[in-house]
Image (spheres, rainbow, N blue to C red):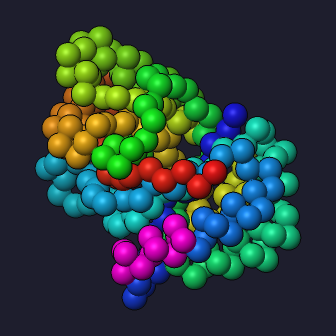
Amino acid sequence: MLTLIAAVRRKPGMTHRAFLRHLHHVHGPLAAANPLWIRGYVQNHVFDASFGAEGDPAHLTAFGRDSVTELRFDDLGALAATMSHPYSREVIGPDGARFNDLPSALALLTRTEVLMPPPETDADTVKVLHFVHGAQRLERDDIVDRWQTANKYLVDKEESEFNRVRGWVQHRQVPGAEEALHHFGGTETLYAGVAALHYRSEDEALAHFPSYESSLRERSEESGGFYDPSRSFALYSREVTVF
């Protein structure tokens, strides 16, 4: 199973609330009316975020993300067929351009590994999406392998702290869908992937995730630096399942 993940922000002159209203009540139903070869569609509505790393002389990542889309496909063929279908090109794409600031969109294709099965979503559940930007001197697979090793080390070392985490999924970037990603705008990036950590509430997310991120940064530095905290960011969101 492949997951296409796209972090987008609203067009200039549009409020966050108007963006989410259109995404949820207009764009989502349009996709649900003709899913094509999409096996699952989730919207993550962002309500808070952190960008870069504490102590940075300058922020190096693009600011402002209003939502994160997750589209699941069986394989690359299903993805390509969906994105090239007339319904995608003539209905979904033009509607997306009404609210999505296309040049700033960030999209990547991933393969998912479940480290801790997420719970069923309810109104209070918070999902933190950590976009990890790889170190430029390393190959993609090396970055992802070091990232996963660091995560396992931190879980073993700080087991009691991770009791706050209710679900944990690692989306590892894979190549092969560059043309399809242009559907969302933007360009190819060096993001190694996205970690999705689920919490029971905002308080639990805010209590645990910043300390986890700090520990991950320290672990990266100890192992020679596998990711770039200055270009990484975290989005605090609530999950909405479209289908």
Determine the residue positioned at 34% across, 66% down: 63
Q: Please identify the residue farthest to the top as the structure is shown.
A: 156
* Residue in the picture at 35% in, 67% down: 64
Q: Position of residue 50 (x, y in %)?
A: 26, 54
Q: Can residue 224 be seen at all in this image of the molecule?
A: no
Secondary structure character of the magenta stretch overall = helix
* Number of marks in the rendered image: 0
Residue 74 among those drawn in magenta: no
Position of residue 4 relative to residue 103, above or below, is: above
Give the left or right position of residue 9, taking residue 73 as reference.
Answer: left
Would residue 80 appear left or right of 117 to someone viewing this image? right
**Closest to the observer, 20 or 79:** 20
Residue 158 figure quarter: top left
Please provide percent x and percent y for residue 68.
Answer: 48, 56
Direction from residue 226 to residue 74 in the image, left or right: right
Q: Is residue 115 left or right of residue 38?
A: left
Any part of residue 8 in sight: yes
Q: Residue at x 22, y 61 (%)?
A: 58
Q: Who is closer to the viewer here, 45 or 111?
A: 45
Image position, residue 6 (x, y; %): 55, 56
From this viewpoint, which residue is outermost toward the bottom?
13
Quarter of the image with the N terminus in it: top right
Measuring 31% from the left and 36% from the top, which residue is drawn there?
199
Residue range of the region highlighted in magenta in the rendering: 15-25
Task: Give the camera-side residue of 156 and 61.
Answer: 156
Question: Where is residue 168 shown, x and y percent of the image?
Answer: 41, 29
Is residue 20 shown in magenta? Answer: yes
